[in-house]
Amino acid sequence: MNVLATIGRFTLGFFRETGRLSVFTGDSVSGVVRPPLYWYLIAQQMMRIGFYSLPVVGLTAFFTGGVLALQIYNGASRYGAESFVPVVVLVGITRELGPVIAGLMVAGRVAAAIAAEIGTMRVTEQIDALTTLSTNPIKYLVVPRLVAAVISMPILVAIADSIGVFGGYVASTQSLGFNGAVYMNNTMNGLTFDDVSSGLIKAAVFGFLIALMGCFNGFHSRGGAQGVGSATTNAVVSASILILAANYLLTNLLFTK
Amino acid sequence: MSAAGTPKVELRGVKKRFGDKVVLDGLDLRIEPGHSLVVIGGSGTGKSVMIKCVLGILTPDEGQIFVDGQEVTNLRGRAREEVLRKFAMLFQGAALFDSLPVWENVAFGLIQGRGIARNKARDIAIEKLAKVGLGADVALLSPAELSGGMQKRVGLARAIAADPEIIFFDEPTTGLDPIMADVINDLIISTVKDLGVTTLSITHDMVSARKISDHIAMLYKGKIVWGGPTSEIDRTDNPFVDQFIHGRADGPIKMEVRA
Ligand SMILES: Nc1ncnc2c1ncn2[C@@H]1O[C@H](COP(=O)(O)OP(=O)(O)O)[C@@H](O)[C@H]1O
Ligand SMILES: [Mg+2]
């Protein structure tokens, strides 16, 4: 009896939450096309989401590229295939690790910050105050963050890709005895439009998910400081899981032809 | 402006529940043009919920809400924004935007809501700040640098900035020391007189309620249990009012431990 009630409550809660998220997503996306669009807020958010994420994303990309080179060399050398290291690093970074690592790092940084900021605005009635001042909170708070994230993430990932490849280059030339010019040459020859563009498409989708989860959880937080705290945690966790799930789906979509 | 006999704001049989918790249970209330009505009631009785239903921040489950005789219960989008231009609200915690300096808070409704140029809005903001006793030096501070009383003043300046017809005050004196509370009361009275607006305030502070109102209504268990001119509140034999204004633990009002 009790078990059934618990399952029932869980199911109802799940559908209520899914319904709320759908409505919220619909309102937010339609807010992008209905004026006003706050350009200066978009620019401000691009600074906060994109520019200030550069150091952490750059560092992680550098080390990931380096580690990738070391590991692939280790595996490839068993078959005498060391010369494939540059291109495998390139493909690994541009298709997968660049977008995913940048996505997860930005999820930790930005989804949390957005949820905390909007959540605080919710519990201190600032969002209600926006409404009373004839300003639609979705358009004023959510839309600029969504647009900024969708624009910033591909740029961020393009930079992360370059730094990641450079990390592989540094590891290969410093620790593995590769010739720098040859490594670069191999990388350039292996470069394809599809590898890079698929990663950038992923990045845009991840940016959308990060901003959406931050805004959604912040918007629906309540119960004071504790509520904002759990909204922040939920935002990071849900954004990270959605990024990994979306990555799988997108990989399926983009590469299995 | 409104036809004789049309209340400025009217709530008819408004019901609102959260889950299985009934907060408003068929609430009827009329606010006549130019009146200053205070709704009193204990904490957690749904006073804020009532105001948010009128503003459309919350949607009632049942019942109707009228503003100047026009039904506004389920308005959304542009139509709602149109109606909201008549309203302003001073929130319980002032609800200032902490990402913006004081003057932009005051000017927010002018710039965002009405599309007034920033320079002009800034002048108006400084003028409104002066009305609530704050100098132009405060204009560039961030809200976090202000005391609670000053935040309330800025909130009041923001509320009157766009010359509203109706102002809601949510617990304007809660959390302030008695002297600052009195300052805020006086400011409310003077600004209201200046603008000739209709006001609805909610509070559990009886000193403030007596001072800023000409009419009082009492909310209990989701309904208005008494209403009348402020002068009559001490003469009524309504047991709810009697218990509330004398702050007695014994009486018909039962404190719900779970708010
Ligand atoms: N958005 C909401 N979701 C769920 N419960 C709410 C919400 N807003 C208010 N409540 C509940 O409604 C009741 C009345 O709240 P409120 O109107 O804020 O009381 P007060 O009279 O002190 O202003 C409280 O028990 C509160 O927990
Ligand atoms: Mg309240």
Image (cartoon, rainbow, N blue to C red):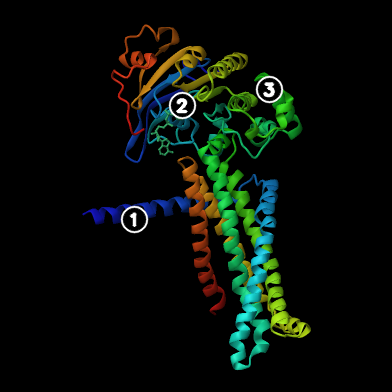
Q: Residue at x 67, y 32 (%)?
A: B102
Does A138 sit left or right of B219 as displayed? right
- Looking at the rendered structure, whether the residues under marks 1 and 2 are on a common chain is answered as no
Q: Which of the two discs, 1 and 3, sits closer to the camera?
A: 3
Q: Which residue is mark 3?
A: B134
Crowd band around label 1 with a 10 angstrom C-alpha radius: few (<14), some (14–19), many (20+): few
Tell me where residue B32 appears, x and y as whole percent.
48, 16
- Ligand 1 quadrant assignment: top left
- SS category of the residue bearing label 3: loop
- Count of number-bearing discs: 3
Viewer can see residue A33: no
Between disc 1 and disc 2, the foreground one is 1
Closer to the N terminus: mark 3 or mark 2? 2
Circle 3 packing at 10 Å, graded few (<14), some (14-19), many (20+), is some
Label 1, label 2: how many angstroms apart (C-alpha)? 38 Å
Name the residue located 44 percent from the left edge and 7 percent from the top edge. Answer: B231
Identity of the residue drawn at 42% across and 20% down = B40
Q: Residue furthest front?
A: A175
Ligand 1 within 8 Å of disc 1? The answer is: no
The residue tagged 1 is A11
Label 2 marks a residue whose chain is B
Q: Which residue is mark 2?
A: B66
Q: State how far apart marks 3 and 2 are (Cα).
A: 36 Å
Q: Amino acid at mark 1?
A: Thr
Q: Is residue A240 above or below residue A89?
A: above
Image-based side of B140 in relation to B193, left or right: right
Q: Chain of mark 1?
A: A
Image location of residue B78, percent across then percent down: 56, 38
Chain letter of disc 3?
Answer: B
Three-letter code, disc 3: Leu
The location of residue A155, given as percent across then percent down, is 69, 63
